[in-house]
């Protein structure tokens, strides 16, 4: 538990939680349908980010809550896509955690 009262969760734990709760229906929907839901969530996150950055001021508490929700939704749908395609996200992320694999930065 962190000092703000929130429980920390690992990538592996969130992927497993999503698998336990939703795998049957997600797998039935398939990659194509699931990817459409994922992209819908990406769009909602993009809209929230654009709305909050347009004013060049701090987000209101309600806008901040919405941003957090949209980020969470994107992560959940990414976990879903990984699950139905047999990808272990923790293993995939070694691309960034293994210092011998991390190269360069994007501008």
Image: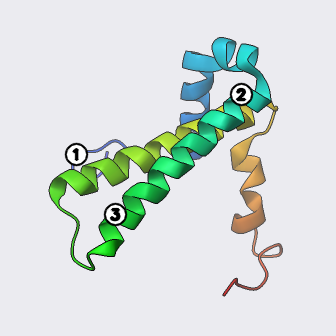
Q: What's the residue at 75%, 75% (across, down)?
A: 99
Disc assigned to residue 36 = none
- The local crowd at label 1, few if under 14, some if 14 to 19, many if 20 or more residues have their Cα within 10 Å, is few
Residue identified by numbered label 1 = 5
Q: Residue furthest left?
A: 61
| Residue at figure coordinates x 53%, y 50% from the top left | 43
Left or right: where 92 falls relative to 2 = right
Of 3 and 83, nearer the camera is: 83
Residue 33's disc number: 2
Q: For the residues carrying marks 1 and 3, which lies nearer the camera in this image?
A: 3
The x and y percentages for residue 18 are: 57, 27
The 10 Å Cα crowd at callout 2, few under 14, some 14 to 19, many 20 or more, is few
* Residue 44: percent from left, percent from top: 46, 48
Q: Residue at x 76, y 68 (%)?
A: 98
Q: Which residue is mark 3?
A: 51
- Quadrant into which the N terminus falls: top left
Location of residue 23 (image quadrant): top right
Question: Is there a contact, CB below 8 Å, between mark 1 and mark 3?
Answer: no
**Which quadrant of the figure has residue 107?**
bottom right
N-terminal label among 2 and 3: 2
């Amino acid at each position: 538990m962190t000092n703000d009262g929130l429980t920390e969760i690992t990538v592996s734990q969130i992927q497993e939680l999503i698998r336990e709760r939703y795998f049957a229906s997600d797998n039935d929907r398939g990659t194509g349908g699931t990817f459409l839901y994922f992209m819908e969530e990406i769009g909602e996150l993009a809209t929230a980010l654009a709305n909050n950055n347009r004013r060049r001021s701090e987000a209101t508490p309600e806008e901040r809550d919405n941003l957090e929700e949209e980020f969470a939704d994107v992560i959940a749908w990414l976990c879903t896509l990984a699950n139905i395609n047999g990808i272990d996200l923790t293993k995939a992320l070694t691309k960034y955690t293994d210092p011998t694999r991390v190269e360069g930065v994007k501008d």
